[in-house]
Image (cartoon, rainbow, N blue to C red):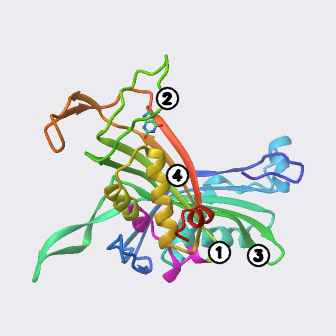
Amino acid sequence: MKKLDSGRTLYYGKGDVMTYRTYAAPLSVGAIEESPFAGNENVIFAHNIKFSVSGETLLASFTEGDNGQVVATDSMKNFILRQSASYEGSTTEGLLAYIGEKFFEKYEHISAIDIEAFRIPFGQVLVRGEHGYENSKLVYRPSHNERAHAKLELIREANGASATSLHSGVSDLQLIKVSGSSFYGFIRDEYTTLPESYDRPLFIFLNINWTYIDHSDALSGESYVAAEQIRDIAHHVFHEYETPSIQYLIYRIGLRILTRFPRLSEVFFESNNRTWETVVEPAGIAQAGVYTEPRPPYGFQGFTVTREDLEEAGIG
Ligand SMILES: O=c1[nH]c(=O)c2[nH]c(=O)[nH]c2[nH]1
């Protein structure tokens, strides 16, 4: 959130700038044991971008209706789209940094920029080739599963743009584990109606955000942590652990992420509990049951896992 020297918040910008860039540079990442993901050909490198600016010189546009220093948000949209064509890198974070730096170069009275993007994922389709089924390099389909996210806050400094904050993430990861999760031992008092559960079908929605110790590691190359790898770690940890709660599950996912990626300083989770409501209780493990959508309201958790946690857990 951008503030002027006076402490006043001031910003304006454009949201939902849908940017479908084709044939960006391919991304290649170092392998980890929980993920087969090795990179992305980036044939479709598409993002929904939100961009806003701040600066002392913009104050008069609010207080006096003087548009003399206003870059129209329509022009911002055009700027983002045009600059996306000349970006030579392969990551969402790199694209955001590129657009932000170019904007500072062009408009010298702008002193701060917030820029964020959700990647719009497109998956490959299988077609029959000479050696059996293979990925088409021409036909893609949008995916409605989780998507990568990044947010960068830049300020102008004497020698150029400086990143005051950079967060990378994966949003809207939705996972259901049909057996191997429990929830019991919580406070039972006059307000408690929830029965203890020793095996529940645990459905979670997850947003996972991570920060790098050194921002430059997020921009490209072998040091990059891909959202697909974080997703695959979450899959593995959920699969491996008998979880007594979502709280404990996200802590364990966080420890695993920081173990795999020493370049990250911390991981932040937002989770939702979307556990199905039981209609027909199964007779035992791996037996038929019937469930329906949970009734509102829903539960949620927020938690940061740091490298200190890793040391305390004796892993770091
Ligand atoms: O994993 C859970 N954590 C909770 O804190 C909670 N509370 C609740 O009603 N169900 C659950 N599940």
- Above or below 124: residue 246: above
Residue 88 visible? The answer is no
Q: Which residue is mark 4?
A: 269
Q: Which residue is mark 1?
A: 214
- Kind of element beneath mark 1: loop
Q: CA distance from mark 3 to mark 1?
A: 18 Å
State the residue at coordinates (41%, 27%): 296
Q: Earlier in the sequence, mark 3 or mark 4?
A: 3
Residue 231 relative to residue 149: left or right: left
Q: Earlier in the sequence, mark 3 or mark 1?
A: 3
Mark whose residue sits in front, 3 or 1: 1
- Above or below 245: residue 230: below
Badge number at residue 187: 2
- Kind of element beneath mark 2: loop
Q: Ligand 1 sits in which quadrant?
A: top left
Mark whose residue sits in front, 2 or 3: 2
Q: Position of residue 83 (x, y in %)?
A: 57, 71
Q: CA distance from mark 3 to mark 4?
A: 32 Å
Q: Which residue is mark 3?
A: 160
Magenta includes 47?
no
Mark 1 residue crowding within 10 angstroms, few (<14) / some (14–19) / many (20+): few
Mark 2 residue crowding within 10 angstroms, few (<14) / some (14–19) / many (20+): few
Q: CA distance from mark 2 to mark 4?
A: 24 Å
Query: What amino acid type should be assigned to the residue bearing mark 1?
Result: Asp
Foreground: 121 or 192? 192
- Above or below 27: residue 246: above
CB under 8 Å between callouts 2 and 3?
Answer: no
Q: Earlier in the sequence, mark 4 or mark 1?
A: 1
